[in-house]
Amino acid sequence: MGIITFVTTAEVPSLSPHGQQGAVALSSRVIPPRLNRVKAAFATAPSSRRHPPLCGKFLAARDGKSSIPAAVCAGGKWTVITGKMNRSVRAGSWVGRAELHLSTLTPTQESSGDVRAFTVRLKFHGDLDFFLGSRERGGTVARGLGERTSVKDVIESCGVPHPEVDLILVDGQPVNFAHVVEEDRMVDVYPVGFLSTQFKKDRLQTICVKRFIADGHLGKLARDLRLLGFDVAYNPHAQDRQLLQTMKTENRALLTRDRRLLMHAVVQTGYCPRSQNADEQTIEVIRRFDLFDSIAPFTRCLRCNASLQKVTKADVIEKLEPLTKIYYEQFRRCTGCGQVYWAGSHFSKLQKRLEQIRGQFS
């Protein structure tokens, strides 16, 4: 007769009654052959009997009150995937949500032999440690696994969205996101701009992008990029599904500070601004996508994103204020919404801001 093996590969975050996060660490257990009859009975039982209420022992363990062998709970029919993660992260944080799929109950499976657990160690270079927990920054992050896993999933389990990763080296060799790890490995993860003279054929990101879509909370960034002449779609009321659909159909790069949204499989190119300041965010985007030489100020409508077209005063005379008719001669009109632009009193401030941006790249 065979045996039933429980494999523990991740950790289950839980909340104590006082709101503190705990973790359930279940030990690997081997169920004696006599329990195979229990498993067989479970497999042939009606569906209504296959999901019994969780026992009190399991609920206690889940809430961080105790640690129990997997075989004790529900007759050995269920076990919990467990492993190491940053315990300092709040259960409601984005890291907790990113690892939600790891904290689920999984049916045990009969195995002809033991599954050997292994450890993947990851080193995040450059500013990628922005996405890590405070205790993991500057060092090596270890992930314990018990099954074959894509390197993309391992990286994102650490909180780093795949559009932020430009180069992956596994034991010094370049790989893509689909590469599978199944034994102890050392993984180096690099952002755009690192090791620029090496591994040129193994880069994972598109560098020069000129069309974007900004998330609803990046309105100032969208306006600044339009001011510099860049095509930025922006709808403050758009839902995530709408953002992703527009991004895909119009082939745009996604700008968002929502890391979960950036991790969506449909996202090919995107960026998460590190700063919360719009001016600094603008510099970040220009640098990330190598846009400096493409800056064309005052060529795009700040309202609707359409291009501006030069027109004569006579073409727009009816829309001008009396003093504007007297003091200004050069005008541009939006080809989309019809908004009229001229070099008014605010123009000098915009020029000064433009020079400050250019000064960052001199």
Image (cartoon, rainbow, N blue to C red):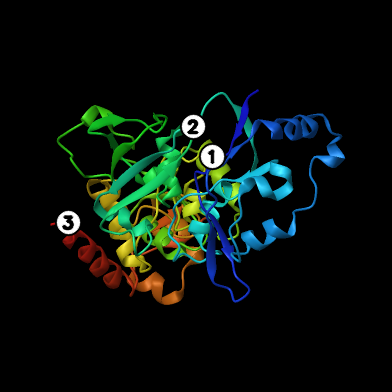
Find the distance from the CA under tag 1 to the CA under tag 2.
Answer: 7 Å
Q: Quadrant of the C terminus?
A: bottom left
Tell me the tag on residue 115: 2
The location of residue 67, given as percent across then percent down, is 58, 58
In the image, residue 194 sits, relative to residue 218, either above or below, namely above
Q: Earlier in the sequence, mark 3 or mark 2?
A: 2
Q: Which residue type does callout 1 highlight?
A: Val
Mark 1 surroundings: few (<14), some (14-19) or many (≥20) residues within 10 A: many
Q: Which of the 4 image quarters holds residue 194? A: top left
User: At which x and y percent is residue 136?
Assistant: 33, 58
Instruction: Give, as a three-letter code, the residue at label 3.
Output: Phe
- Do tag 1 and tag 2 residues touch (Cβ < 8 Å)? yes
Q: Quadrant of residue 209?
A: top left
Q: CA distance from mark 3 to mark 2?
A: 53 Å
Instruction: Give x and y (percent) for residue 230.
Output: 37, 50
Disc 1 target residue: 7
